Amino acid sequence: MSSEVRFTDFKSDKQPTWCPGCGDFGTMNGMMKALAETGNDPDNTFVVAGIGCSGKIGTYMHSYALHGVHGRALPVGTGVKMARPDLEVMVAGGDGDGYSIGAGHFVHAVRRNVDMTYVVMDNRIYGLTKGQASPTSREDFETSTTPEGPKQPPVNPHALALAAGATFIAQSFSSDALRHQEIIQQAIEHDGFGFVDVYSPCVTFNDVDTYDYFRDTLVDLQDEGHDPTDYDAAKEVILDSEKEYQGVIYKDENSVPYHELHGVTEDMSEIPEGAPEDATDLVREFY
Amino acid sequence: MTEDLNWAIGGEAGDGIDSTGKIFAQALSRAGRHVFTSKDFASRIRGGYTAYKIRTSVDRVQSVVDRLDILVALTQRTIDENLDELHEGSAIIYDGERSWEAEIPEEATGVDVPLKSLAEEAGGAIMRNTVALGAACEITGFDVEYLDESLEKRFGGKGSKIVENNKEAARLGQEHVQENYDLDHLGYDLETTDEDYVLLNGNEAIGMGAIAAGCRFYAGYPITPATSIMEYLTGRIDDYGGHVVQAEDELSAVNMALGGARAGARSMTATSGPGIDLMTETFGLVATSETPLVIADVMRSGPSTGMPTKQEQGDLNMTLYGGHGEVPRFVVTPTSIAECFWKTIEAFNLAEKYQTPVFLVSDLALSVTEQTFRPETFDMDAVEIDRGKIVDEDEVEEWLDGQGRFRAHAATEDGVSPRALPGTTDAAHMSTGLEHDELGRRTEDTDTRVEQVDKRNRKVETAKEREDWDYREFGDPDADTLVITWGSNEGALVEALDYLEAEGVDVRVISVPYVFPRPDLSEEIDAAEDVIVVECNATGQFADLLEHDTLTRVKRINKYTGVRFKADELAAEIQAKLEAEVPA
């Protein structure tokens, strides 16, 4: 079926309620194109999302999907992948969802290296609650809850991921459609946890981290000759807070995904009609 | 008197109390004797008072009593903690060479055994508890061969040398008592029988039930006293194609289990009070996304961190009402270790048939107590699995709307919608915690909202009609006094009947394994002169429900000391309650 699948097959008939011009349109299009391009179809794809503007993505895409509670999308994705290693699992979240309420889950999902793709739609602001500071907001970014700026440094998600032992770390920009799609594709094809932070501008509440800002400042790591398999080079890029960049930052080519490492390969949805054949062994143990 | 023996070993945590007790319990079980164990432990790794108690009889035993016949005391505190339970026939095994000087109460007989020296003679001081077991065999006239079998089972994996050394240690203990004491006057002579028994606790029964029911995915976070469910499954579920993930916290655990269930695997998580609190956010999501999920709560003393290693049945309201908004669910409450097995299987069936969260509510007393059962109690051939309305590819079409979209939340007559597992062609759909229409798409349309709320609640109504919300009954069915209970109190209550009968008090006992929905007890309550509800909490959460159901005041027996009910204690309390003029 995969050869016939077009990216529009991943589109639902529900019109997005994102603001006109929102970066999330581009982020989602890239995800759908990458899924189609990597040979997936809506029936074998499971998309998990949390809460917020990013969380709406499951509604606008067509696949098996769960729209869960705030910040807990990664554990849901982990459970889906354990039960059905044959499924393509994609988890989407926002910067609040992923780096604030879900930060603990993020770190642990990274270190588990479950074979799924995690896309964070990062607009450096809380959009759906109408403009409060997010974990990636700049230190001096004035918002309704931080009139003088958060006065604390933004979270560096890539550094968090690297420290937790990530096997694939990338950054893309929703407006650079082709590169964004390419990067998501690489994350899907990666054997393990493919983490992509996406600059996905909020045109309503963030007048600092705008399309123009990213277009003007963005450095493509590929143009720079960056070697993503070089851990030290990746570290250097990640810790350089002066630079906005896109591309695959780090990729461990020896990555073994969790399910393979733990021998979780069976389809757990199929079970016998009664107790398993050798279940009496379980009773015998207690003699 | 020799039919019913109460044995205990006590000392500090880290003294090997638990494994010694387990070895003796297994030996008794292998000898065809019934066993009922209880544990007294503190929330610490080393130090503090810890005890393992065994009640054993050729007849079935299902409760602890206020009586101790043989006590292995590794510390003076062990003796002091049990003073009330000692009597003239009690023997206390202690090590006179130890630095503490044992103060043996007048009525009991001290049996001084150089546990440490004899253990060293057998190959290492670590085996001193085994020496004590040998001594106990001699005092009770129990055939040491059974102890040998139990030692083989316990240490077999560590090599034959360790097994042989332990057998030798037991023999030395036995001989020491033989040579230095004449204890025939105590009158112990333990019978053995040819019966086959298995010995297991409630958490093991839940774990075994989960595997039997086809549970394949478990996610949990360690917490006392639920952890041993995860430990049991971790060692075994992989053999059946399953997997356990130790999550980073309870929020993650319940969401992982939700993911597993959503993908089509029978999935489960288990926790205790504080963990249930953390999971609460997700209950509503499980219910509105109509995902079948089993959530076990092994209750301990609350609130807050309360007393982690002590008994209580205080989470009933939490599992019944927890979660914002109105969350349709089932609350199933096993009343014995065997029921822990069967109700776990039922919980999985209910979850999938009705696509709802099912709370399996157990308690600390059930979880740590080991009890003997005939192996056929856990008859695997009798396990039935009902996966509910899973649609295959051929059936998808009848559930599509005019535009070919799958109606995952179709408002059916019985409230149960078709369920398509991922991978089913043309049935891809989203589910959400937001209010949604039949397709799973967000809506705030008033009619659709009402339709979906009614649809979800209708599942419970359907289940009320279709399932058998039965209860268990004991005692005299015509008695004027009706005692109602739930959870682990059943065993003690059943045994209390014997004490009451001896006093000429006839009682009818009803033990309820379902809290929501629950059996309608109006007729039984109306027919009784006195109704007493027994539960391990301070406020009478189950009694409140019954009063609500029947608009009748009931009497209450509540215990919230952190210790489970004992049979004789319960008998006395029931009598006192019947004599009291004013209902309390």
Image (cartoon, coloured by chain):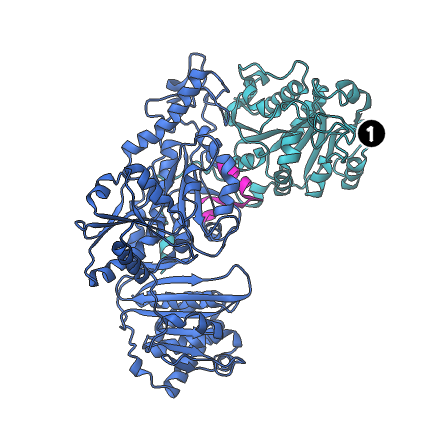
Residue that extends furthest to the top in the rendered view of this protein: B402
Identified at 59% across, 18% down, the residue is A7
Chain that the image shows in cyan: A
Residue under numbered circle 1 = A224
The image position of residue B177, as x and y in percent, is: 39, 83
Chain that the image shows in blue: B
Residue B238 part of the magenta segment: yes
Q: Which residues are magenta?
A: B237-258
B403, above or below B313, in the image: above
Classed neighbour count for the residue bearing mark 1: other residues with Cα under 10 Å, few (<14), some (14–19), many (≥20): few
Q: Nearer the viewer, residue A130 or A184?
A: A130
Residue that extends furthest to the left in the rendered view of this protein: B478
The image position of residue B501, as x and y in percent, is: 20, 60
The image position of residue A223, as x and y in percent, is: 81, 26
Q: Is residue A82 visible?
A: no
Please state if A281 lies on the left or on the right of B508 as rendered.
right
Please state if B417 lies on the left or on the right of B260 as rendered.
left
Identified at 56% across, 37% down, the residue is A75
The image position of residue B329, as x and y in percent, is: 40, 35
